Amino acid sequence: GEDVEQSLFLSVREGDSSVINCTYTDSSSTYLYWYKQEPGAGLQLLTYIFSNMDMKQDQRLTVLLNKKDKHLSLRIADTQTGDSAIYFCAEAYYGNNRLAFGKGNQVVVIP
Amino acid sequence: DTGVSQDPRHKITKRGQNVTFRCDPISEHNRLYWYRQTLGQGPEFLTYFQNEAQLEKSRLLSDRFSAERPKGSFSTLEIQRTEQGDSAMYLCASSFQQSSNYGYTFGSGTRLTVV
């Protein structure tokens, strides 16, 4: 079944790197996503990775996928105050009829 | 196109009343999804439509909940006889079927408070 776990809170200084982790239990997931949610707002898709990839880099974002351990991470380089938000990982099956989200990880960037 | 629009942004209602929310997806998107997000949790899937057909419903969608997408464009989510446990953010998202694996576009949500 779908069960996505995330740690809850991360504090980071502006300019440092942030790393957010996520574990999932369903090995049949084909796509994994990172979404960002700012206060009072909906979810913004940041990036995604297909399950046959190990790594994906997109500007300041690096996604690492360890399928053996069912572990997904998001690294944000040169963290900015605008990166303060809640970050959700999510998994989907082929066809993407539904996403299963983790509880989210709140990132607070200290100027 | 300004993205996925949801209306209203906030709704306060008394327990037992009926409420209806509206979602306008991105115009060329043929898939539309409803999720519910309670405080401190990630969104949970409720239901999704492909065009006007409701293809999947979560067991979270009790018989007090009904969703429609009559012309394959906007969608409504109605909750009858609201309960305090229905208080949550209701999120709508849309995607184009052929590119749905690349993620959805979410609206800003409707926050429901049942008092």
Image (cartoon, coloured by chain):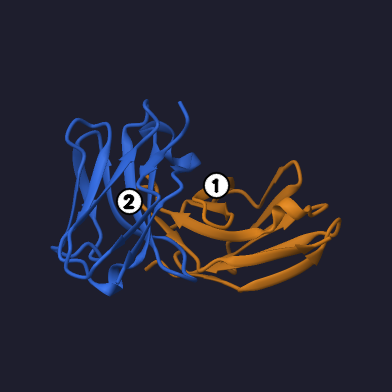
Chain colours: A orange, B blue
Few, some or many C-alpha atoms within 10 Å of disc 1 (few <14, some 14-19, many ≥20)?
Answer: some
Look at the numbered disc 1 and give the secondary structure of its residue. Answer: strand
Q: Residue at x 71, y 54 (%)?
A: A83
* Direction from residue A47 to residue B38 in the image, left or right: left
Residue occupied by mark 2: B34
Residue occupied by mark 1: A44
Whole-percent x, y for residue A97 in the image:
34, 48
Whole-percent x, y for residue B100 in the image:
42, 39
Q: CA distance from mark 1 to mark 2?
A: 15 Å
Residue reaching furthest right? A15
- Residue in front for this viewpoint, B44 or B85: B85
Q: Are marks 1 and 2 in contact (CB under 8 Å)?
A: no
Residue B77 seen in this snapshot: yes
Whole-percent x, y for residue A68 in the image:
59, 66
Q: In which quadrant will I find the C terminus of chain A?
A: bottom right
- Residue in front for this viewpoint, B53 or A70: B53
Q: Residue at x 61, y 67 (%)?
A: A105
- Residue in front for this viewpoint, A106 or A101: A106
